[in-house]
Amino acid sequence: MKRVIAIAAVLLVCAAAVAGAAEFPTKGKSITMILGTSAGGSTDVGARILAASMEKGLAANGNRIQVENKPGAGWQIGLTALARSRADGYTIGFTILPQTITNYLDPERKAVFDRKSFQPLGMQVVDPGVIAVKAGSPYKTLQDVIDAAKANPGKLKASATGILSDDHLAVLQLQKLTGAKFAIVQFDGSAKAMTALLGGHTDLYFGNVGDTYPQAKAGEVRVLGVMDDDESKFLPGKTTFSQGIKLESSSSRGLSAPAGTSKEIVDFLAGAIRKAIDDPEHMKKMEEQGLTVRYMDPARMEKYWADMEEQIKPLMGMAKEK
Amino acid sequence: MDTFSSLMMGFSVALAPTNLLFAFAGSLFGTVVGILPGLGPAAGTALLIPLTFHLDPTGAIIMLAAIYYGSQYGGTITSVLMNVPGEAASAITCLDGYQMAKQGRAGAALSIAAIGSFIGGTLATLGLVVAAQPLTKVALRFGPVEFFALTVLGIVLVMGLAGKSMIKALIMAVFGLLIGMVGMDPTRGSPRFTFGLTELLDGVGFIPVIMGLFGVAEVFENLQEEGQQVIETTLSSLKPTAQDLKASGWAIGRGTVVGFLLGLVPGMTGTASSVLAYVAERKSSKYPEKFGTGVIEGVAGPETANNAHANAALIPLFTMGIPASPSIAVLMGAFMMNGLIPGPLLFKEHASVAWGVIASLYIGNVILLVLNLPLIPLWVKFLKIPYTILMTIVLAVMMVGAYTVSNTVFDIFVMLLFGVIGYVLRKLDFPLAPIVLTLIMGPPMEKSLRQSLEMSQGDFSILVGSPIAATLLAISAIILLSPMFKYAWKRWVSQTRAQGA
């Protein structure tokens, strides 16, 4: 009899555990979405749009998505908070690439996390890199720029948006691929870099489709290449690949949970995120800002992340040398 | 269509009842964002973006724009009443605004600030209407080299902030520069003076430092004095006197010019504008030694400047689609999410939206003035709260405010530490204004210097390579050396006299 009771108890506990897992998320409990950047940036606005769509999907269960800005140290503060939070599914956050990778690959930053600290949940946006010049610039093609840079090494001024930003890595990669040498000027943010380009203070702008789109559409800048294999629907035409330069770079926004989150919870969250991304309202708002929505499921995002890490490693030394 | 008829069309859009309501809602919410320390206009606007999805685009943008410039009005209230900057751009207003409140003249300070803000904001919008294109051309000439020269000029002006002792002022200026050095190096990304703390990689936050130096230090100082009296405010002192108005007239004029010009320069912050406007007031005053004791020009100048700045900074957004500050970036996001791309095309493709928003800037400024002036007696009543309770409220508000800036407890500790530092500095009679100036101008000065040298690959001659930069540096040199020349001249004159006699 005792045995029967014991077995029954074990079964009950198992059932409760299964039920508990199936019950994620508890009705009415809110989910925190950590964002390592301050309120008001393009990533923040994109996150809030996604959060609104996610809430719509979870409305039946009454779960709210609370966007929590933890800005600072080029995402390191927010990423640290995410990596250290409980793996119970109630805290998720944005792990943007390549920023997250350069955070832990840079020894000076002493980051407490790496790729293994996060469980990918899904990719929202992949914003391809762009090389642009001011309208009226003598450089018409990427080749013109490379030829000019080779003829006068270090004379052509190329802007990037901060040390080890995706734009900075793109300049370094272009130098590595072609042997050209630029004077790299760091700005804090794409708006300041764009202003410098339009004012004629720099010759080349390294940015992303999303931040180049308004000026490209107004004819203020000429896009020399989108750093992708596929054509961008916002800036169609020239890709770097179509010009024979295999330069691929982007800034991508994906969501992750802390590592160790159970598979059931990951599946649930990944499903909720996918549904929110497919929401026509989310799609429309993102596209109007020139942001390329490119959904990836957790497995694909994980591979994308690992591949990018391998690609960046050899550039790390170059970035800090003078 | 000429500018005038376009603007009239804009007014017909902005005066539509729903749009008026949006302008009012935005102004009100903006004032609240301004009053609350820590919550800045960028965050305030971003919070409302999801709410605007289902609104008509013109109304949504009118509302978000009103939050942006409305916050500049609200920031003053906290600065004057609590000695805590509600908004970074109102930090310098603490110096004289709070002293005025202590003398029972908070009403006059707030009225002048509201009037100055109105005039500054309206004139800057006029600039946007009549000369946006040429102004943008001039603004774009400010690259890293020119920006560096401008910050040098700003820092040199610190001498104008010296009180009784030049040495003490300079020590404080260097202290401000040193605080600004904490964090990641702007071009190499190497941590400096961070003691291994991730929280310090971005440097020490301006808002927590200022809240500490001014607000917390003030609370500490009040703790010492037993039996503090409630500030006496008579009704007549709610309004500015004729003398106040006369003194403020020129200050408002100067504040408009300073704020408008700096607002055009890409990368200049409203805080820099208000601080430099304060310096300008002190420099041009007949009684500079009285600044910091409750001089109304010290409120009128900076408060006008930050509003002129806020409206002038919209010019690059409308002409080129360039967001000059994080708050304007949010506004730009709102445009784009509604399928409108700020820039020259906006006026061609969506003229009624573009001009409607511009017209609403005028209307919003009127709403803010009408909204703020009658509320002043109410705000001033706040000071009637007994000191013991008032100081507790102030401290609690500051704690929440410091936390709100980046949602970290770390900033609360930074604030408290600087509260202690501020207390000690006050006791030793060190002036605080120079710290504010160098803390604001130091980091962008370093950044633009490094950018310039990156552009030239290390060649320093680039710094005088442009006419604007060379002129600004020459003016700085003249200001810096003029006391020496004056001294030499006086000596020479007295010597020749002595020889003659």
Image (cartoon, rainbow, N blue to C red):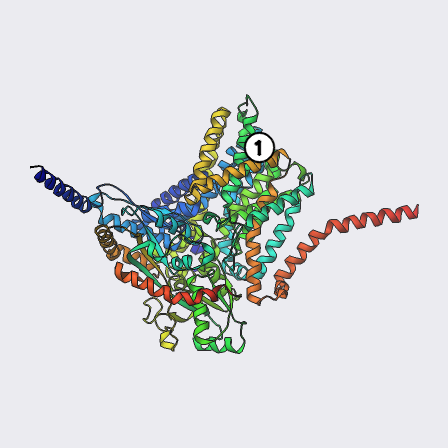
- The answer to whether any part of residue B136 appears in the image is yes
Q: Say whether residue A53 is left or right of residue A81.
A: left
Residue visible at 30% across and 58% down? A124
**In the orientation shown, which residue stands out farthest toward the right?**
B501
Give how far across and how far down residue B409 sits, in percent: 43, 41
Circle 1 residue: B100
Near-viewer residue (B354 or A69) = A69
Q: Is residue A11 above or below residue A170?
A: above
Residue visible at 40% across and 40% down? B28
Q: Is residue B470 above or below residue B365?
A: below
Near-viewer residue (B37 or B12) = B37
Q: Looking at the picture, which amino acid does disc 1 mark? A: Met
**In the orientation shown, which residue stands out farthest toward the front?**
A2
Q: Say whether residue A260 is left or right of residue B97.
A: left
Give how far across and how far down residue A197 sits, in percent: 49, 65
Residue visible at 54% across and 39% down? B418
Give how far across and how far down residue B327 sits, in percent: 44, 50
Q: Say whether residue A299 is left or right of residue A320.
A: left
Q: Secondary structure beneath disc 1? A: helix
> In the picture, residue B318 is in which quadrant?
bottom left
Near-viewer residue (B431 or A75) = A75
Q: Quadrant of the C terminus of chain B?
A: top right
Give how far across and how far down residue B454 sits, in percent: 55, 64
Q: Quadrant of the N terminus of chain B?
A: bottom left
**In the orientation shown, which residue stands out farthest toward the top?**
B227
> In the picture, residue B139 is in which quadrant?
bottom right
Near-viewer residue (A136 or B453) = B453
